[in-house]
Image: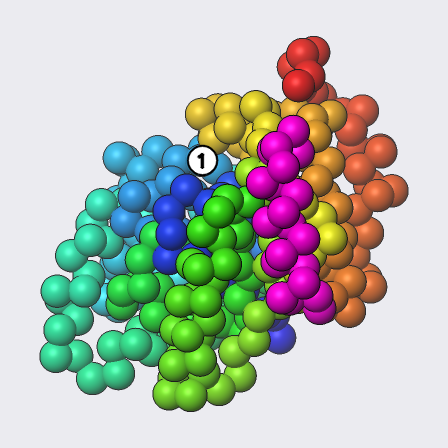
Amino acid sequence: MGKIVTICNQKGGVGKTTTAINLAAFLAFAGKKTLIVDADPQGNATSGIGVNKETVKESLYDLMLEKAKLNNIVKNIHLPNLFIIPSNIDLTGLEVELVGTIAREYKLKKVLEEAKRRYDYTIIDTPPSLGLLTINALTACDMVLVPLQCEYYALEGLSKLLNTLDLVKNNLNPAIEIVGVVLTMADFRTKLTHEVIDEIKKHFPEKTFKSVIPRNIRLSEAPGFGKPVLLYDKGSVGAEKYKELTEEFLQRNMDVTASIESDYEQLAQEEVLDSPDTRD
């Protein structure tokens, strides 16, 4: 039985979608059959992985309203083990349409039951809010990964999210747990970044991933080309750090069957992983 991981933080611009795409890509690269679920009406994970959200005929919206089947919506992308349930602006109307619906917080959990049987990992990208879509994602998952930007108000935002997770755990999903906090957008030239990292590690020593994701031009550019950074620029610092994060994630899940390192060196020579000559 596969595991469902929700990437969650109610703040926008903290690297949720970047983390969802790149963690999923490296999991797929490690041989894990991986499904991205774009639960954000903005559809950034959809376009960022190379699917035109404007031409998507059936999306997560149709799946959650039981107007479509999983097989008809899932798209294979880039890597043999990487798939996505796309999203677009249609998803904005879902909360209104589910008003008065019994057990509306469990809609996503219900439709992902089949995915849990078919995929090793299902990665849910959530919107920057704690509305019904995010609650559905938290109710459906086994674990939560929290991206946290290295900024002044990082701890304040995290405390609000932890309160929400407690409510979900007590009322909707008693099995939910935080697999870890990943620090993102780190600028190691600033004193603030080092202070935030130290503070987060002090408060959450067991939960904070050792891998810290830096600000990186290639990470920022990759979504514009519809690719995870693994395929856009395998030699960039961003790619290396997400590889390290994925290895750490697999270790935390005691998933010793997966191996990135040996395959990475081999496939890095193949044309599919060709990348720009310029590095940052």
Q: Residue furthest top?
A: 277
Residue 189 belongs to the span the image colors magenta: yes
Who's the residue at 82% across and 52% down the image? 259
Q: Is residue 24 left or right of residue 32?
A: left
**Pointer 1: what residue?**
48
Task: Check the image and report above or below for 99 versus 9.
Answer: below
Q: Is residue 34 left or right of residue 164?
A: right
Who's the residue at 31% across and 58% down the image? 129
Q: Residue 241 location, x and y as percent?
A: 70, 40
Who's the residue at 58% across and 40% down the image? 192
Q: Residue furthest right?
A: 262
- Examine the rendering and report whether any part of residue 96 can be seen: yes
Q: How many marks?
A: 1
Amino acid type, callout 1: Gly
Who's the residue at 68% across and 17% down the image? 279
Q: Is residue 191 left or right of residue 59?
A: right
Task: Check the image and report above or below for 106 versus 238.
Answer: below
Q: Residue 208 location, x and y as percent?
A: 66, 60
Q: Hey, which quadrant is residue 233 in on the image?
A: top right
Say what secondary structure mark 1 lies in: helix
Magenta part, dominant SS: helix
Quadrant including the C terminus = top right
Q: Assess disc 1: are there few (<14), some (14-19) or many (≥20) residues with their C-alpha within 10 Å of its C-alpha.
A: many
Q: Hey, which quadrant is residue 180 in on the image?
A: bottom right
Q: Nearer the viewer, residue 118 or 188?
A: 188
Residue 72 belongs to the span the image colors magenta: no
Q: Residue 278 location, x and y as percent?
A: 67, 12
Task: Check the image and report above or below for 143 versus 219.
Answer: below
Q: Hey, which quadrant is residue 165 in on the image?
A: bottom left
Q: Residue 173 location, x and y as percent?
A: 44, 83
Residues in magenta?
187-206
